[in-house]
């Protein structure tokens, strides 16, 4: 099943704007209040929430904090992916986005004791440099050909 991002590009393509999109889901998460979270915790067993899901709900304020710092709802999926990386203890989050690493550095410089970002957000070439890779292999790519990842 495909769930659209729900952003500008989808609107330009004529994809209907529904409540079934990544951005809509994240906006729903952002609206959760502490009493909503408390209710979910209270009924966790009945609705089948795992310990990890409960911990994630209890850290929804982290996602809310990060999303507040983005200029546009278009960036909410990036914030959500960063939250998922943090929740899963991922050391490095690779992105092709140009603005995301800068935004994360800006948030880190706020020195907010309640909300720490431990995941490094890097572009692939930055990561390779850290790994000590200085010479890149040539990738034989021909224009107009579609490549699948296996």
Image: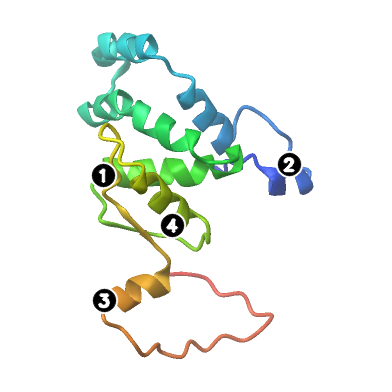
Q: Residues within 10 Å of mark 4 (few under 14, many from 20)?
A: some
Judging depth in this view, the residue of 145 and 122 nearest the camera is: 122
Whole-angstrom CA distance, mark 1 to mark 2, is 32 Å
Q: Is residue 38 above or below residue 52?
A: above
Q: Circle 4 sits on which residue?
A: 101
Across and down, in percent, residue 45 comes to 24, 14
Q: Earlier in the sequence, mark 1 or mark 4?
A: 1
- Mark number for residue 15? 2
Q: Nearer the viewer, mark 1 or mark 4?
A: 4
Which picture quadrant has residue 80? top left
Q: Please report the residue visible at 73 percent of the width from the left and 41 percent of the height from the top.
A: 15
Label 4, label 2: how far apart the Cα atoms are? 29 Å
Q: CA distance from mark 4 to mark 3?
A: 18 Å
Of label 4 and label 3, which has the lower sequence position? 4
Q: Which residue is mark 3?
A: 131
Closer mark to the observer between disc 1 and disc 2: 1
Q: Residue furthest front?
A: 110
- Which residue in the structure is indicated by mark 1? 88
Query: SS for tag 4?
Result: helix
Task: Give the distance between the C-alpha atoms of the residues marked 3 and 2, in whole angstroms.
Answer: 41 Å
* Tags 4 and 3 touching, CB below 8 Å: no
Side of 105 relative to 69 (left or right): left
Lower position in the chain sequence, tag 3 or tag 1:
1
Front label number (4 vs 3): 4
Q: Nearer the viewer, mark 3 or mark 1?
A: 3
Number of numbered discs overlaid on the protein picture: 4
């Amino acid at each position: 099943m495909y769930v659209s991002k729900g952003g500008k590009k989808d609107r330009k393509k004529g994809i209907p704007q529904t409540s079934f999109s990544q951005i809509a889901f994240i906006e729903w998460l952002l609206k959760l209040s502490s009493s909503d979270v408390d209710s979910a915790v209270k009924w966790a067993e009945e609705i089948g929430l795992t310990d990890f899901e409960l911990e994630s709900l209890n850290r929804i304020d982290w996602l809310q904090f990060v999303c507040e710092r983005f200029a546009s709802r278009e960036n909410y999926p990036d914030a959500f992916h960063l939250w998922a990386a943090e929740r899963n203890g991922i050391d490095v989050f690779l992105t092709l986005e140009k603005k995301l690493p800068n935004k994360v550095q800006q948030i880190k410089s706020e020195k907010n004791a309640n909300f720490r970002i431990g995941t490094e957000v890097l572009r692939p070439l930055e990561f390779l440099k850290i790994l000590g890779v200085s010479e890149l292999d040539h990738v034989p790519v021909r224009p107009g050909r579609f490549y699948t990842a296996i």
